[in-house]
Image (cartoon, rainbow, N blue to C red):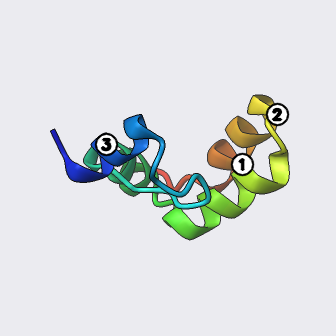
Amino acid sequence: MRHDLWTFLEGTLCHDIMFGYSGDRGFLQQRGVHPTDFLRSTWAAKGDEKKILVFVRQHATEA
């Protein structure tokens, strides 16, 4: 397992840090959404999943 996963499971990883895994990066890249913009929108949504989905749909480039 990856080091950052172990530290998270042990509770020693800072919860204010997000690690972008290949699935995350692939998802965002396929939609043309920059990870920083996605994180800002997620933070601004304050847990409202509908707001996050709206952001992704509005900002996704057409493939």
**Disc on the earlier residue, 3 or 2:** 3
Quarter of the image where one finds residue 5: top left
- Of marks 2 and 1, which one's residue comes earlier in the chain? 2
Position of 4 with respect to 9 (left or right) is left
Q: Disc 1 versus disc 3: distance between alpha carbons?
A: 28 Å
Residue 1 vertical position relative to residue 60 in the rendered view, above or below = above
Asked whether, in this view, residue 18 is left or right of residue 4, the answer is right
- At 57% across and 69% down in the image, what residue appears? 36
State the image coordinates of residue 48 (x, y, percent, origin top left): 82, 33
Please name which of the two marks, 1 or 3, marks the residue nearer to the observer. Answer: 3
Which type of secondary structure does the marked residue at label 2 adopt? loop
Please give the name of the residue rendered at 37% of the width and 57% of the height, measured from the top-left corner.
29
Can you give x and y, in whole percent of width and height, for residue 61 in the image?
A: 51, 56
- Residue 55, which numbered label? 1
How many numbered dots are placed on residues in this image? 3
Instruction: State the residue position of label 3.
Output: 5
- Indicate whether 10 appears above or below 50: below
Identified at 35% across, 47% down, the residue is: 7
- Residue type of the residue flagged with mark 3: Leu
Q: CA distance from mark 2 to mark 1?
A: 11 Å
Seen from the viewer's position, the closer of residues 26 and 59 is 26
Tell which circle, 1 or 3, labels the residue nearer the N-terminal end: 3
- Residue type beneath disc 1: Phe
- Mark 3–mark 2 Cα distance, whole angstroms, equals 25 Å
Q: Nearer the viewer, residue 27 or 11?
A: 11
Position of residue 10 relative to residue 58, above or below, is above
What residue sits right under mark 2 in the picture? Answer: 48
Mark 2 residue type: Asp
